[in-house]
Amino acid sequence: MRAGCAVASFAGAFASSHGPLIVREWDSVPSNEKERLQKAFKELGRRVTAARPDVLVTVSPDHWANFFLDNYPAVCIGVGATNEGPPEPWMKAFPSRELAGHAAFAMHVAEEALRSGFEPSISHRLKLDHGTCIPLWRMELAKMPALVPMLVNSIEPPMPSLARCLEWGKLLRKAIESFPGSLRVGILATGGLSHSIGEKTMGAIHEDFDRETIRLFSSSEQSLVQYLEEQLPSRGNGSEEVRNWLVAHGAAGGQGFELVDYLPVPAVIVGCGFASWR
Amino acid sequence: MRDYWLSKMFFDLQQPALAAEFRKDRQAVFARYPLDQRVKKALLEDDAPFLAERTNAYLLRYYFFATGMKDAEFARRLRGG
């Protein structure tokens, strides 16, 4: 980078839970929980808006919208100028069928990754499923930033290690701060906290695990990763999505986050967490 | 263990047109995939624990959603109830 040349800046990191029942079973959510969820989504949206991101890197799993057993990448970066809205029929009310990407920045992330010993898959057109789109929708952003999707496998074993996800976050930060131009780039991690899908424990929410995980995000990376490595195998398969929070944590410098809200919501079978990093 | 074709059918059933066809005639959709007889039997009996050993948990949930089964009933079946 030439001296005096402007580079992009990190605008902030945020996290939000997602889950199909937040849409499909919204009417059956008790009113007090519904109000808290609405408030948390809107507050997160307010914070994202206040950060003024031109680009939002959305870190989410792919819930079998793009990939199958033929080829399921550990990490995929969406480098297209445009991506598709959610393919799920029950997401048809989502307001956008297409979402603008930022090809130049996304390709810069992919190239920076490859230069640094990371090997992401890339896609020039992704379907952004409910994992990405429920938080974007419910946050009610007045202006949608360009989206650079980063899909991290937390659905089908084997999955990237927790430590690697932290490193991915650090790499994202490096990519942001080496991209020429005055772009402001935020990160939105989605998924988690505890939930269990399609397994015998389906519906279980582990509030103790969720609260300890939240606490440890303000502790050392080693403590956080060690705890998660020990606990994740018994805390429901949906809890694996905490990988996305680790990416945000790594990008934000590991300084911990401000918890916007946490509440276990049995009606949507998710321990719902909302956070913005310091 | 992953049963590729069972999983492929579940994956494909995310397409609304195929899901609609499936709701009218399950057997016709089953016939398009080289499924083992034991797997077909489990599908016809909604044997969730048997199927769970052979596919991804999220795909299994999609499948039972496509059949019209509510999550609560699906969870009960997963637990062998």
Image: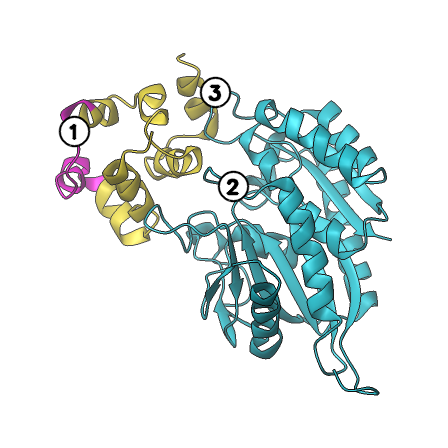
- Where, by quadrant of the figure, is residue A26 drawn? top right
Secondary element under disc 2, as helix, strand or loop, is loop
Q: Nearer the viewer, mark 1 or mark 2?
A: 2
Residue at 25% over, 49% down: B18
Q: Is residue A139 visible?
A: no
C-alpha gap between disc 1 and disc 2: 28 Å
Q: Nearer the viewer, mark 3 or mark 2?
A: 2
The chain under label 3 reads: A
* Left or right placement of residue A201 versus residue A194 in this view: left
Chain A: colour as depicted: cyan
Q: Nearer the viewer, residue B39 or A105?
A: A105
- Where, by quadrant of the figure, is residue B66 drawn? top left
Which region shows up in magenta?
B24-38
**Dot 3 crowding, Cα within 10 Å, few <14, some 14–19, many 20+:** many
Chain B: colour as depicted: yellow
Q: Amino acid at mark 1?
A: Asp
- Which residue has dot 3 on it? A200
C-alpha gap between disc 3 and disc 2: 21 Å
Residue at 60% over, 23% down: A204
The answer to whether residue A116 is above or below residue A152 is below
- Which residue has dot 1 on it? B36
Q: Nearer the viewer, residue A40 or A226?
A: A226
- Where, by quadrant of the figure, is residue B13 drawn? top left
The chain under label 2 reads: A
Q: Amino acid at mark 3?
A: Lys
- Which residue has dot 2 on it? A159
C-alpha gap between disc 1 and disc 3: 24 Å
